[in-house]
Image (cartoon, rainbow, N blue to C red):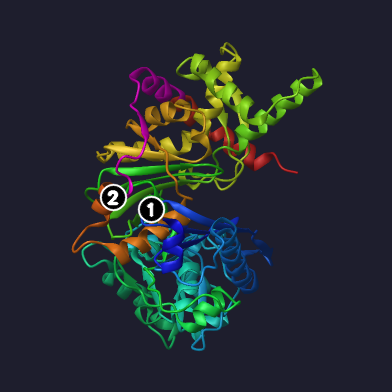
């Protein structure tokens, strides 16, 4: 019974800091969510930097937990005073440097900032490893190149999840998945690549800073390891009312990529997941390393340190949303009241009647630039051949193809690399209409796509599972086996395999899409306010 687990203090808490919401979930011994809470927030743009203030971070943490406590009291009529385990997760990457007194030296620079181009390019060259702009080490080296005065005072560098974990436990540690978004990980040692650490130190040796890179990075831990206990100070920070007792164990803090993999049962080699909402990205657990460096593919890790190939694209469903809004406005002119969900469903289903290559239509959903296709800026753009088959079905299929065309562009590299993919799990708004998004994604990536019915709450549920795995794992039980045999066993799911007709049609569509990339670049260069 859920009420007994709350009374006995055995329920597990997971908290994730997303870019727009801080989510808290409490799970029981059956891995189902028994209570939840959330807090909405937004980043600030301050002096050219996307950031969240320290005040907003702490108050958001407390507000999300308070909302969870309120939900527990409302559902079960008892206060939440003890928990059996806790996990913290957050958006990955970014820059949080602290001095010896754990004072933040500059405002938090989030993953959204694209101000580290020179640093990322140089580190990619030195490491022979793709270093994206959003990674923590790219931010650090850019601060070095900019001669920022705070760099000499850095005593600790971490991520948002790592900082919150420190405040709750006093320990400077990080889960390997989150650490893999700071700098490259050696999969054999499950910690930072020592050769690259040495290369970085040599790169900045002339600056004569009083620290070496290894001195300021968090200690790396793998899933299942104990990452400390909730201190009295940590308990008061999380729950200022004083009701929450200290002493529960915490799992290694993780990034949202690792918790997403956990929440979709895609941590085993040859599996992966695609998250498709405002942005879209794929994460495929690699069986063997890629043959060379690809700027289109980031290499991160699972929470157990297995290498993962990641294709990250900035735009996905926003352009579809805009067109659907236009169609609903037109319906309103005719005096018709429409429900947004019903309109989406009808239009998605209509796309199934289309030509497999969209009949000569091409759409760009680029509200922002896309590094995968080498474009710094984007402009939403619809193009058609003079003799194209312009009908609603083809138009809608082109819109849906556009939501995943850039992802496919990157995934085709994995195909050429012969990356083995047994199954990919799809999650996010693109898959709400049964089968449609799955069908097109399966064609795009040439692999079966599965959508599951999970009772979880996304990444917050994923970090709660990682905390439960640490507390309740059996002997040498692997995370892969824990998820497969305990959490996801018997869960309802639907799998769609690639249709050869769709695959061939999507490939033809991509030929036209690629041929139009110069036009997209020209639009960004010349179409301005």
Is 271 placed above or below 509 here?
below
Q: Which residue is at 72% across, 42% downward?
A: 528
Q: Position of residue 323 (x, y in %)?
A: 66, 29
Q: Element type at marker 1?
A: loop
Residue drawn where x is 56% and y is 16% of the image:
393
Instruction: Write the start and end of the magenta stretch as one range.
Output: 486-509
Q: Which residue is mark 2?
A: 486
Does residue 400 appear in the picture of this structure?
A: yes
Residue 497 belongs to magenta span: yes
Q: Residues within 10 Å of mark 2 (few under 14, many from 20)?
A: few
| For the residues bearing labels 1 and 2, Cβ distance under 8 angstroms | yes
As drawn, is 365 to the left or to the right of 273? right
Horizontal side, residue 176 vs residue 94: left or right:
left
Q: Quadrant of the N terminus?
A: bottom left
Percent coordinates x, y for residue 475 in the rendering: 19, 64
Residue 443 in which image quadrant = top left
Distance CA(mark 1)–CA(mark 2): 9 Å
Report the residue marked by disc 1: 31
């Amino acid at each position: 019974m859920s009420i007994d687990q709350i009374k006995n203090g055995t329920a597990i808490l997971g908290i994730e800091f997303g870019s727009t919401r801080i989510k808290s979930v409490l799970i029981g011994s059956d891995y189902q969510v028994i209570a939840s809470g959330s807090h909405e927030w937004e980043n600030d743009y301050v002096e050219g930097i996307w950031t969240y203030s320290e005040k907003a971070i702490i108050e958001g943490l407390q507000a999300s937990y308070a909302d969870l406590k309120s939900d527990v009291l409302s559902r079960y009529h008892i206060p939440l005073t003890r928990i059996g385990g806790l996990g913290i997760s957050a958006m990955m990457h970014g820059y949080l440097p602290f001095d010896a007194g754990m004072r933040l030296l500059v405002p938090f620079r989030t993953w959204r900032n694209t101000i580290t181009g020179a640093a990322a390019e140089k580190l990619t060259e030195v490491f022979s490893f793709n270093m994206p702009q959003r990674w923590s080490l790219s931010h650090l080296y850019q601060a070095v190149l900019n001669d920022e005065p705070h760099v000499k005072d850095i005593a600790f560098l971490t991520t948002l999840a790592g900082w919150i974990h420190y405040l709750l436990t006093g320990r400077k540690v990080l889960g390997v998945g989150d650490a893999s978004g700071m700098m490259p990980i050696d999969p054999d040692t499950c910690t930072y690549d020592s050769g690259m650490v040495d290369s970085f130190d040599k790169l900045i040796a002339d600056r004569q800073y009083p620290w070496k890179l290894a001195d300021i990075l968090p200690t790396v831990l793998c899933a299942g390891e104990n990452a400390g206990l909730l201190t009295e100070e940590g308990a008061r920070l999380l729950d200022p009312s004083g009701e929450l007792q200290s002493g529960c164990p915490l799992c290694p803090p993780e990034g949202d990529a690792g918790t997403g993999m956990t929440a979709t049962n895609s941590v085993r080699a040859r599996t992966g997941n695609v998250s498709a909402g405002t942005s879209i990205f794929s994460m495929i657990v690699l069986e063997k390393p890629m043959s060379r460096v690809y700027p289109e593919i980031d290499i991160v890790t699972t929470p157990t340190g297995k290498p993962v190939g990641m294709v990250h694209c900035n735009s996905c469903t926003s352009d579809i949303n805009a067109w659907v809004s236009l169609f609903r406005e037109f319906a309103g002119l005719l005096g018709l009241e429409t429900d947004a969900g019903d309109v989406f469903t009808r239009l998605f289903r209509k796309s199934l009647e289309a030509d497999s290559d969209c009949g000569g239509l091409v759409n760009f959903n680029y509200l922002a630039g896309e590094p995968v296709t080498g474009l710094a800026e984007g402009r939403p753009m619809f193009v058609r051949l003079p003799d194209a088959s312009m009908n609603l079905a083809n138009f809608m299929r082109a819109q849906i193809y556009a939501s995943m065309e850039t992802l496919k562009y990157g995934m085709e590299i994995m195909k050429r690399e012969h990356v083995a993919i047994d199954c990919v799990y799809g999650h996010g708004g693109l898959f709400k209409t049964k089968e449609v998004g799955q069908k097109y994604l399966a064609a795009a990536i040439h692999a079966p796509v599965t959508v599951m019915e999970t009772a979880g709450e996304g990444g917050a549920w994923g970090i709660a599972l990682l905390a439960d795995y640490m507390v309740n794992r059996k002997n040498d039980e692997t995370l892969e086996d824990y998820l497969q045999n305990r959490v996801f066993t018997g869960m309802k799911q639907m799998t769609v395999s690639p249709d050869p007709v769709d695959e061939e049609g999507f490939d033809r569509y991509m030929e036209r899409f690629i041929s139009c990339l110069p036009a997209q670049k020209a639009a960004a260069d010349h179409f301005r306010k």
